[in-house]
Amino acid sequence: MGTRVRRFGILTSGGDCPGLNAAIRGVAKAASGRYGMEVVGISRGYRGLIEGEARTLGQDDFSGILTLGGTILGASREKPFKSCDEGSCSDAEAGMDKPERILENMDRLKLDALVVLGGNGTNTTAHLLSQRGVPVIGLPKTIDNDIWGTELSFGFHSAMDIAAESIDRLHSTALSHDRAMVIELMGHKAGWLALHAGVAAGGDVILIPELPYQVSEVAASLEKRRAEGKRFSIVVVAEGALSAEEAALPKKERKRRREAEPYPSIGYRVAAEIEQAIGMEARVTVLGYLQRGGTPSPYDRVLATAFGTAAAELLDAGRFGLMVAMNDGRIGTVPLSVVAGKTRTVPVEHPLLGTARLVGTCLGVPD
Ligand code: F6P
C-alpha cells in the first residue's frame, strides 16, 4: 500500500510479440475508464524512459488496437542496469547513470508508477528499479513462455498457432518428396514453443534444449519410420537445442565449437546430421520472426486483456514490486524479486514430454 496513482507510465521492452497492444489497451482502458488515471506511453522500452521520450495517451490511442500485432509504443532491448564494461555502449552512453536518468525522467513526467510489459530481462530491470524505490508492476509477455513465476505469458499461444500451422503445411512437401523436413522454431533457451507446436502438429522428432539430443536416437527413430513404410519425417528443433556431446562441454568451449561450424543455426546442423547418418534427404525451414508477427490469437487477446486489467487493479490498490502472473489457471501476482534473474525451462518430468513419447515422438534421447 502507498502511493495513490494519478498518472503512470507504460512501456513495452524486449522483443515484440502478439498481444502487447491488447495488454496496453487492457491496462489503459481499466486505469483511465474505471480508475480515472492518466496514462503516459513511453517510447521504445526503457530507452524512452532514459531519453524522456513519452506522451500522454488518450482514448484514441488505445481504441482499435486489440487485434493489432507489434506494439504501438515501440520496443528496445535496452538494459539500463547493464554496465558499459564490455564496450557495448555508445560514447554518449558511457558514463551515463541510466537508472538515475530514469528516476529524473519519472519525476519530470510526473509519473507516480510504472507498468512494464516484457520478458525475463524487462522484469529483472523492473525489480532493480523497484529496489531503487520506483513503484512498478510487471506484465509477462514472450513467445518463449520462459518467465519465472507464471505458467503462461501472452504471445506464446499466438506463436504456437503460427508454428503449428507452419508444420502442418510442411507435411505435404515432406510426403511428396520422401524427405525429412526440419523446422527450427524460436524459444531462446527454453523448449516450450517447440514442444507445444511439435505435439500440436504431430512432429515425429522434437528436440529441445532441456533434453540434449543424441544423433543416434534421432537416426534410429527415422529409420524405424522408414521401415514402417512412412516415407517422410517432420523434425521440430528448438533454436536452443544442443547435442549431448555439446552439453557436456564448458560453455565457452561449446560456443567456440558452434562458431567454427559451417551451419547458420542448429536446424541446419541437425539436417546435415540426418543426411550423414541415414542418407535421407533433409530440408530446413527456419520460421524466424513470422512466429512473433501479426494479430494475436483470440486466447492471447483474452489473456493480455485479463493481465492488463489486473495490472490496473494493482495500480489502484497501490500494490507494487509485483508481476501479474497465471498459476494453476488463475491470475494472481508474484513478487518481482522472485522473478528476477531466472528462466523457466521445461522440467524433464513435464507431463507433455510423456504425452509426446506415448504418441511415438522421438525426443532425441532414450525413452
Ligand atoms: O524472446 C523472444 C525471441 O524471439 C526469442 O525466441 C529469440 O531467441 C529472440 O527473441 C530473438 O531476439 P532478437 O529479435 O532481439 O534477435
Image (spheres, rainbow, N blue to C red):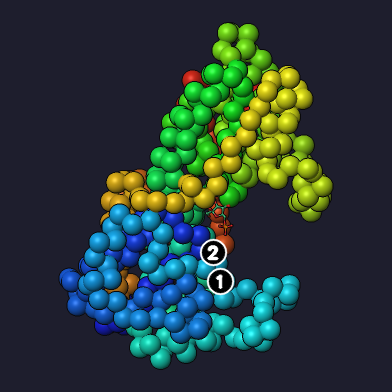
Q: Nearer the viewer, residue 117 or 88?
A: 88
Residue picked out by circle 2: 121
Residue displayed at 43% across by 75% down: 43
Q: Which residue is mark 1?
A: 78
Pointers 1 and 2 in contact (C-beta within 8 Å): no
Would you say residue 138 is visible in this rendering?
Answer: no
Q: Nearer the viewer, mark 1 or mark 2?
A: 1
Mark 1 secondary-structure assignment: loop
Q: Position of residue 328 (x, y in %)?
A: 35, 45
Give the residue drawn at x 54%, y 64%.
121
The residue at the point 45 percent across, 29 percent down is 168
The C terminus lies in which quarter of the figure?
top right
Query: Residue drawn 49% across and 20% down?
Result: 359
Secondary structure at badge 2 equals helix
First reached walking from the N terminus: tag 1 or tag 2: 1
Amino acid at circle 2: Gly
Q: Quadrant of the N terminus?
A: bottom left
Dot 1 crowding, Cα within 10 Å, few <14, some 14–19, many 20+: some
Image position, residue 72 (x, y; %): 37, 67
Q: Quadrant of residue 232?
A: top right
